Image (cartoon, helix red, strand yellow):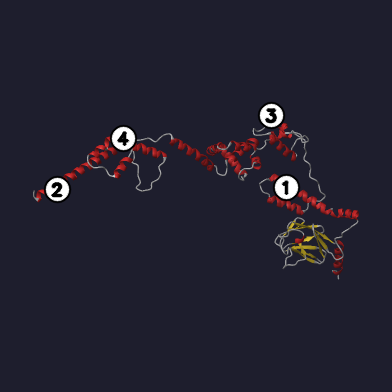
């Protein structure tokens, strides 16, 4: 055999090998196209080429396992002939064939609906409470119970303690929204249904008392000593008048409150004790300032505190005016007298612990330090860390009048009237001087001052 015939034989063998290999590849590609056409209704799942892949969820694991089992079942009839034809597919082609599901497999119905329902239930209360704004479900329930009891939004605003400090206008707008706005009322009802039964019971126990309930409680005598059985019997006799959440203990507590404020039928309001002192200008000014500074938080409580404070101030002033009378009685009984004045003392600034004598026409008040020496050290009377080192100056004029000038940062109160920094005020006998919660009584030596005034009157005409 010559060289030319040997070359032709080799080329024909190579051509036949390549032809058979191309026919095998074409048959395998045709089988793949047929299988992909049969599966045309199912979208192809994307696969990542990364080495680290994400974990599959439960539904994906079920779906992929079913897909693998179906491909194995179909591979026995559809893929095996391709293998017998000559060449095996590559590893990437095996992955593609195994991952492509052969038949549409529906996801398992059991876990998916339960999972979605669980997610919805967990997110729903959060969304509802978020849409409610400042008004919490407990506030809405409090508002509804209070309005049903009193039928008065002003009483609800004054008597109910909400989670936020709402104004009367906000309470009115919220009530009208719960009545007439379907979206807000629906959200509020859904949020109130989510409350715990114990929380609902606690809210209902805080409901305001209606006029009918207070009228029944006021019939219980103030001189009697009712027990819990008395109020339990009252609940049994009038089940329609009282709220369902009322207990005998709650009725007893409210009855005691009504008795304290003289609201029972057999009680009469006692008048305030009348003092001999006539209302002066400083007292009227204090009333005006209190009315300006009054907040809308609790008007009833502030009024009671103001009345009690004014009563105590009136009693203190009456006792201070009667102090010298009681001193005379004490001296007559003990036989000892401790005179405040002598021939050189012009006035006395008397505190609870220390008595300061004024023996010059001008003295300084304040807090003594190493670098600052003053005439009257107020730290001997009590805590004086709020007092300035030079708080004020007391001077005696030629006409016999005493004046105090404030030179500190804090005001000085003379008989309840503030004297600001840079101002001065006339001091009279028995004036109450208050400096940083330290109180003193200013007493004047009337005999010595009368002599000074007489001398001033003699010098003036000359």
Counting residues from the N terminus, which is met first, the one under dot 1 or under dot 3?
A: 3
Q: Where does the image place residue 294, in percent across and percent down from the top left?
A: 68, 49
**SS class, disc 3:** helix
Mark 1 vs mark 3, foreground winner is 3
Label 4 neighbour load within 10 Å: few <14, some 14-19, many 20+:
few
Q: Residue at x 23, y 38 (%)?
A: 84
Distance from Cα at disc 3 to Cα at disc 2: 116 Å
Label 2 neighbour load within 10 Å: few <14, some 14-19, many 20+:
few
Report which residue position mark 3 lands on.
236
Residue farthest front in this picture? 1
Label 3 neighbour load within 10 Å: few <14, some 14-19, many 20+:
few
Q: Nearer the viewer, residue 38 or 299?
A: 38
Report which residue position mark 4 lands on.
73
Mark 4 vs mark 3, foreground winner is 4
Q: Where does the image place residue 421, in percent across and percent down from the top left?
A: 71, 62
Distance from Cα at disc 1 to Cα at disc 2: 119 Å
Residue farthest left in this picture? 2
Counting residues from the N terminus, which is met first, the one under dot 3 or under dot 2?
A: 2
Distance from Cα at disc 1 to Cα at disc 4: 91 Å
- Is residue 251 left or right of 32 when viewed as pictured? right
Q: Nearer the viewer, residue 204 or 353?
A: 353
Q: Residue at x 71, y 30 (%)?
A: 233
Q: Where does the image place residue 89, in percent across and percent down from the top left?
A: 27, 43
**SS class, disc 1:** helix
Report which residue position mark 2 lands on.
11
Q: Are marks 4 and 3 in contact (CB under 8 Å)?
A: no
Q: Is residue 264 above or below residue 279?
A: above
Instruction: Give the label on residue 305, or none.
Output: 1
Counting every numbered tag in the picture gives 4
Counting residues from the N terminus, which is met first, the one under dot 4 or under dot 2?
A: 2
Decide if residue 309 is in sight here: yes
């Amino acid at each position: 055999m010559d060289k030319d015939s040997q070359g032709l034989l080799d080329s024909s063998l190579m051509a036949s090998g390549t032809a058979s290999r191309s026919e095998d590849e074409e048959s395998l590609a045709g089988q793949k196209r047929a299988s992909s056409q049969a599966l045309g209704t199912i979208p192809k799942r994307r696969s990542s080429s990364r080495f680290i892949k994400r974990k599959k969820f439960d539904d994906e694991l079920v779906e992929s396992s079913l897909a693998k089992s179906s491909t194995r079942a179909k591979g026995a009839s559809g893929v095996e002939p391709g293998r017998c034809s000559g060449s095996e597919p590559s590893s990437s082609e095996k992955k593609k064939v195994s991952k492509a599901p052969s038949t549409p497999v529906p996801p398992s119905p059991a876990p998916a609906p339960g999972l979605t329902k669980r997610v919805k239930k967990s997110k729903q209360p959060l969304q509802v409470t978020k849409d409610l704004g400042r008004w919490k479900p407990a506030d809405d329930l409090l508002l509804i119970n209070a309005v049903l009891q009193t039928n008065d939004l002003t009483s609800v605003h004054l008597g109910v303690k909400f989670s936020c400090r709402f104004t009367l206008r906000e309470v009115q707008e919220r009530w009208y929204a719960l009545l007439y706005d379907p979206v807000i009322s629906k959200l509020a009802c859904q949020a109130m249904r989510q409350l715990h039964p114990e929380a609902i019971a606690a809210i209902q126990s805080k409901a305001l008392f209606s006029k009918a309930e207070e009228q029944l409680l006021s019939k219980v005598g103030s001189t009697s000593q009712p027990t819990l059985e008395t109020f339990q019997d009252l609940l049994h006799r009038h089940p329609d008048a009282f709220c369902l959440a009322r207990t005998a203990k709650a009725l007893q507590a409210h009855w005691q409150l009504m008795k304290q404020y003289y609201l029972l039928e057999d009680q009469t309001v006692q008048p305030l004790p009348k003092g001999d002192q006539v209302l002066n200008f400083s007292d009227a000014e204090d009333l005006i300032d209190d009315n300006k500074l009054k907040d809308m938080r609790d008007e009833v409580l502030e009024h009671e505190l103001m009345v009690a404070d004014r009563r105590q101030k009136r009693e203190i002033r009456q006792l201070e005016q009667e102090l010298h009378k009681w001193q005379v009685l004490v001296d007559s009984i003990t036989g000892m007298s401790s005179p405040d004045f002598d021939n050189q003392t012009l006035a006395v600034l008397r505190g609870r612990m220390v008595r300061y004598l004024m023996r010059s026409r001008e003295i300084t008040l304040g807090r003594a330090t190493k670098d600052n020496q003053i005439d009257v050290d107020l730290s001997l009377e009590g805590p004086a860390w709020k007092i300035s080192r030079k708080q004020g100056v007391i001077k005696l004029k030629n006409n016999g009048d005493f004046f105090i000038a404030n030179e500190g940062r804090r005001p000085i109160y003379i008989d309840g009237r503030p004297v600001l920094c840079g101002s001065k005020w006339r001091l009279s006998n028995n004036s109450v001087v208050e400096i940083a919660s330290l109180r003193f009584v200013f007493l004047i030596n009337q005999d010595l001052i009368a002599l000074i005034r007489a001398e001033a009157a003699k010098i003036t005409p000359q």
